[in-house]
Amino acid sequence: PAAFVFVGLALHLFGVKMGPFLVLLFIPLAAISAVGGSRLKRKVRRSLRRQLAECGVPCCIACGYNLTGNVSGVCPECGTKIEQ
């Protein structure tokens, strides 16, 4: 998003019509933002699950499945080994 401002300003200063350039820039930047956003979301969720597990709330750190009553040591949802 910040890149759009700088590129748009530079193109405007040089008198270039921005329509085609913005379309060409938007597609790769949107894809990069989507990938980065999903990675950040995964990291935040994993961190929250880890904090819940440290506080004694039984949940799988990998998928968030509620592990109340689970005695097998494996998450039934994703198969991750549970650290006791």
Image: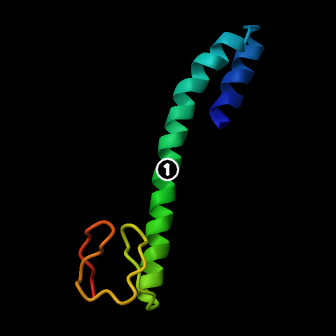
- In the picture, the quarter occupied by the N terminus is top right
Residue 36 at x, y = what percent?
Answer: 49, 46
Residue 83 at x, y = what percent?
Answer: 27, 83
Q: Nearer the viewer, residue 81 or 36?
A: 81
> Which residue is depicted at the point 31% across and 86% down?
70
Q: Quadrant of the rendered structure where residue 64 is?
A: bottom left
The 10 Å Cα crowd at callout 1, few under 14, some 14 to 19, many 20 or more, is few
Q: Quick check: 64 above or below 9?
A: below
> Which residue is depicted at the point 55% across and 31% down?
29
Residue 53 at x, y = what percent?
Answer: 42, 84
Q: Nearer the viewer, residue 73 or 6?
A: 73
> Which residue is depicted at the point 72% across and 13% down?
18
Amino acid type indicated by mark 1: Ser
User: What residue would you read off at disc 1?
Assistant: 38
Instruction: Tell me the element at label 1.
Output: helix
Q: Nearer the viewer, residue 82 or 34?
A: 82
Q: Quick check: 40 above or below 21?
A: below
Colour scheme of the rendered structure = rainbow
Q: Quadrant of the rendered structure where residue 9 is?
A: top right
- In the picture, the quarter occupied by the C terminus is bottom left
> Which residue is depicted at the point 41% across and 85% down?
58
Q: Nearer the viewer, residue 43 or 67?
A: 67
Q: Quick check: 33 above or below 43?
A: above
Number of dots carrying numbers: 1
Residue 15 at x, y = what percent?
Answer: 77, 8
Q: Is residue 35 left or right of residue 19?
A: left
